[in-house]
């Protein structure tokens, strides 16, 4: 039985919009009901950033900042869980063993972050590897996929399919420009590489794109191991 | 040794403002360091209301709505905990036994909600009763205390000291007008009455008011059992 | 799929009688096997009252008294669980999220109390709301249902069907007489009202009455929202 | 720092009597305050026996019967904990690691049973060994100590001091007579022997006897390894 | 539905050998798939003995030594669990209630030790009794079963079928010789006796023997209650 | 108050040697007693590698392999904990929040791994950042520190002090040669950099080196942020 991971940008979940989240959980349930095992990972988004900013300004260390981001992402995850219940347990898994337990009982785990020092992108890959998923769908907010340079840079061109190495190269060039635009972190890349997992970046602001990508339509950007 | 409970309106914590929360945790720490046992309870505020509204619109039952509010209040509580750490454990207590355990080891519990069907005001009283606190400080957001009618009604007059019965009467008249303005719920009143706990409503938007009220200054409104 | 809650008076469970509890769990299993989701809530009864009395006499606060009652009700609940096992997990759920998890995996949660300041009647309603039950069966011990005055008062008449408001009125008149005869508390009423849940009081000392009430026979007293 | 274990017969705790339990917890606290580490273990007593009898009559297996006894003993333990709080945590430890954690933070663990197939006498020895206690005080209910034959047999003589081997011999002769009179089980004996722990049986129905035995007065029966 | 327990000697699992453990988990899965409920218990073996020896040499008490052995056996159990996953949960149950929960959800619990003062042989019997198993298969490492004297003694003869009493007698004669050769402990015997459980000792170094014994072939030694 | 982290190579702990581990825990206790907060992280070493190898040979995925390594490292950590008890809790923390809780109560956390996809070196840095440690002592087994090329390569020269960037460069050159010799991973480097933490590599096979490095002696290799 196939397994997939759906990574949802935190900015798609909070502030919550009725039509959007309603359709998003329908699309996730649809994949689940097709007989594929699905796990969901949600980011912290703007909610996380507000708490983090104030903690930083008040001198909290990097670890406490990250933890506040993780807790925020778990609230976003809880919110999706309660919309998916009883397909999902209400409890948000806080580590990969809990995810494996939920999957083993035929339900949809919805996780937020796991630990300081890693992004929810890394969590998506950690989970993908654990549950034997060969595909991660990464739902961006109003971005079509990966571009050959910063998406807002003039002449930026959407890429159909690239390798992980190419993605790393592009991301590191972004970072020299902008510092914050994080499609992926090093741990996510490493896991994708060692377990040969494909990451499919799509514009998640249209929930219908998820099922399209799941069925194999060529939208967004596919990042293949290599 | 005296014990007190500080109930903080969720709207004072999220969206977070650096100067405000910085001073608030200082004032809480100051009471703790004076040798008084302190427990803190934080509401869900606007953060909770956003998730709840969407859940309601999507047809989630009342219990799931309340649970989303509880989870939101716990994120607010976590945020204050991480600012108080190591005076507070990072872990937000989820029931009264956990609060008693934290108090017994000389630290400051920071709770959010406990359970569907009760407000964080009720949680503040449940905790007050458990830890033997005879005073609850209820920090409102830009409201001076309890008024003889709805605070925005013409001619509304701030009350110095009233009984619980009088408070119930006023609150139920508010509710006929506005439906949503909840200073207190029935469970909170009942516990305050049976264990003779005073509730001191103050304007928490100035953090200095907390220590003033703690020392016995006559600001805001004192609600005495009866 | 329908869901119902069965609230069992603690005095029906302890001291335990073989024939009675044997038949009671059969009736509960029968409802479960008919395809209806069932949750059970058990009170503390005389077991709770003994510990509580001594705690009060020794000066323990109201919260510690309530907690001893909760722990007693959980022992009663554990006892029924172990008779229902494997239809029930052995573990007694201690909050509503745990109840939802057990229900989601197709089993029968058997809870006792949850928290100081609320009765197991309130717990029954909290659970009913959470699992989407529209009916709560409240099994009394040798009382047929709700009477128009105190059941032992001369001329007391059993009522077929009343509204929640009428129930509140009757209960508060009882309390003026007797102080202790608690059919329901304020929190239970509030939840029944907001989620439109019917409470069916029956004489639980005959276990057969449960299935009769479940099938819709007009025994005992039906309390409808309103 | 010395460590001791106090084993309390369940029949001394339930049904609870105000004067007795009040004094008992004072005596325990007194030992704790003298600078000795104390752990308490409480039996299930008559409370346990009632649930067990009905489970047996209804055909529950031996393991479920034992578990009901363990749960009952934990309720008795919880009751003493709540009287000792904050010297004791409210939470009843359910295994030896939890006991070690409570002891390491300077408090009094109050345990009931641990596991099917062993008595609370064995639990007392397991804990004694873990916390490095060389003495277990075993509080009997209206029995002065160990007799050379069944205490109610004609000519029975109270023994001052015996070896473990002698105790085993006496107990096994009791069992041929009465089947139920269990001063100790095999596991308890084995642990006492391997870790050289003295068991001091005293009449616990007078709480003052505990402190007397603790100070070294020759009351009851001392059972020495050997 | 029948239930059985498989007790695996720790020396069969660590140091791990690919072919062996691969086949062992296949045989366990085969019994499970035949519709029989299976629980597995793994010993600590040489892994445990190394840690224990050093703890003893450094003066750690007997309880801490036993706990290190328990932790080692749980690592062995985790290893088998991860090979059985998703038939087994990854989480190693640490007490009998957790075993009952796993069995109730149709999966294979794989436990190590439970508590100081008892062997993993006792754990196997505790679990057998709890899940209603009438047979325990005890997989020895390169020993065919139970002999009439120490297996390495000259003239030792393998026994087909004996009673528990005979087993106790033989084991105690072994101990006078060797001190360490522990086929069974007193607690295991007691539970086997009270719940009439058969223990089937076989040479587990050939994994095929497990299924043979399960089907009723007369290999090794069968120990019947009595 | 200063805080430090001690990272111990798994090969120093298992197979355990009495003299070595005895002295190691003394040195750790000595730092603790000097008033510095200490956390310890232990690797999986050869114990982990055995289980991992067999899991890989049997086709388990990378995540299950990593988890077996984590569980092994936790057994090593448990072993050191039980030697440090009561300075350490027996419970091995499984995430950074648990470490912060142990530190806040004045004790020594002893962790193993946390999560698939990261080494125990990364865990040491995650913990250092969380507890505000500016120094991590990395105890190698019979290696003096970091060399300018592979330590066994001809002409390899021990380096006194280098930057993180230099370390990365050296490690990646090692990897081209040997694939397995992992002084550090990318996540560890990133955290050391963002929180400006110094990593001091020393030969841990002489436990005395730890205290020397702690006092500031120039042994081994110091890796400074940059």
Image (tube, coloured by chain):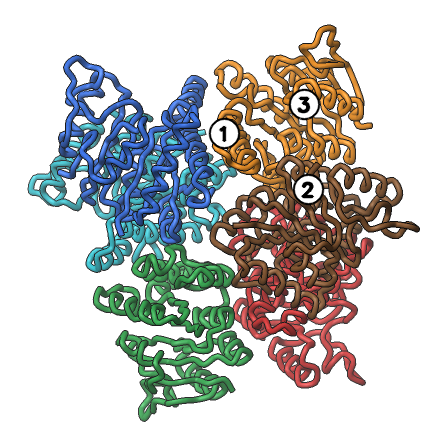
Chain colours: A red, B brown, C orange, D blue, E cyan, F green
Which chain does the numbered disc 1 sit on?
C
Quickly name the residue at label 1: C57
Residue D113 in percent (x, y) is at 37, 35
Classify F109 as above or below F184: above
Q: Is residue C126 left or right of residue E176?
A: right
Determine whether, in the image, residue F91 is placed left or right of residue D34.
Answer: right
> Against E12, is E175 above or below?
above
Q: How far apart, in angstroms, are the residues tagged by discs 3 and 1?
A: 25 Å
Among the 4 quarters of the image, the one containing residue F6: bottom left
Mark 3 = which residue? Answer: C183
Q: Residue furthest bottom?
A: F155
Residue drawn at the location 76% of the way across and 14% of the way down: C148
Compared to residue D32, the image places residue C226 above or below, namely: above
Label 2 packing within 10 angstroms: few (<14), some (14-19), many (20+): many
The chain ID associated with circle 3 is: C
> Which type of secondary structure does the marked residue at label 2 adopt?
loop
What's the residue at 91%, 50% (across, down)? B155
Task: Give the image location of residue B75, x and y in percent.
Answer: 65, 57
The percent position of residue D136, horizontal first and vertical second, equals 26, 38
Residue that badge 2 annotates: B116
């Amino acid at each position: 039985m196939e397994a997939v991971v759906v990574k949802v940008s935190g900015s798609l979940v909070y502030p919550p919009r009725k039509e959007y989240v309603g359709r998003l959980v329908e699309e996730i349930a649809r994949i689940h009901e097709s007989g594929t095992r699905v796990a969901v990972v949600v980011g912290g988004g703007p909610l996380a950033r507000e708490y983090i900013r104030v903690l930083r300004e008040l001198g909290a260390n990097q670890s406490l900042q990250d933890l506040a981001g993780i807790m925020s992402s778990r609230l976003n995850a809880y919110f999706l869980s309660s919309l998916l219940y009883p397909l999902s347990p209400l409890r948000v898994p806080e580590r990969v063993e809990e995810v494996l337990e939920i999957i083993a009982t035929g339900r949809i785990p919805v996780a937020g972050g796991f630990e300081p020092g890693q992004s929810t992108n890394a969590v998506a890959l950690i989970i993908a590897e654990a549950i034997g998923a060969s595909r991660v769908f990464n739902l961006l907010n109003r971005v079509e996929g990966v571009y050959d340079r910063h998406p807002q840079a003039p002449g930026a061109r959407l890429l159909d399919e690239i390798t992980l190495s190419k993605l790393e190269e592009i991301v590191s060039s972004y970072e020299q420009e902008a510092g914050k635009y994080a499609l992926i972190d090093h741990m996510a890349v490493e896991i994708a590489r060692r377990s040969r997992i494909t990451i499919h970046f799509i514009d998640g602001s249209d929930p219908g794109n998820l099922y399209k990508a799941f069925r194999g339509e060529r939208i967004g950007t596919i990042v293949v191991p290599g």
